Image (cartoon, rainbow, N blue to C red):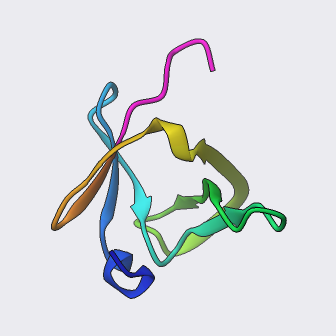
Amino acid sequence: MRLSELGGKEIVDVKKAERLGVLGQTDLEINERTGQVEALVIPSLKWFGLKRQGGEMRVPWRHIKKIGADMVIIDIPEEE
């Protein structure tokens, strides 16, 4: 899969059944030594995505369970 194919996919938390954001509005955290993607950094949004609250959520790549045609499914253990 190419980076350009990830844009526009919704990020959904499988445990909370909640939409966290859209790829394209997120940042990728990349390890400079290895070139591997370490995490998604999802900004906290307010008012239907129109205004940033200033916070962000870091989702380690290992918690991404499935990248489908329309969405990215994440599963974050409750202890994190």
| Relative depth, front residue between 30 and 75 | 30
> What is the residue that sits farthest to the front in this orientation?
34
Residue 48 lies left or right of residue 55; in this view the side is left
Q: Quadrant of the C terminus?
A: top right
- Residues in magenta, as a range: 74-80
| Relative depth, front residue between 55 and 73 | 73
Residue drawn at (51%, 38%) of the image: 62
Is 76 drawn above or below residue 51 in the view shown? Answer: above
Residue drawn at (38%, 81%) of the image: 2
Residue 19 location in percent, x, y? 34, 49
Is 2 drawn above or below residue 31 in the view shown? Answer: below
Q: Main secondary structure of the magenta part?
A: loop
> What is the residue that sits farthest to the bottom in this orientation?
4
Residue drawn at (34%, 28%) of the image: 16
Can residue 61 be found in the magenta stretch?
no
Residue 55 lies left or right of residue 62; in this view the side is right
Residue 15 location in percent, x, y? 32, 25
Can residue 77 be found in the magenta stretch?
yes
Residue 6 lies left or right of residue 39; in this view the side is left
Q: Quadrant of the N terminus?
A: bottom left
Quarter of the image for residue 67 reads: bottom left
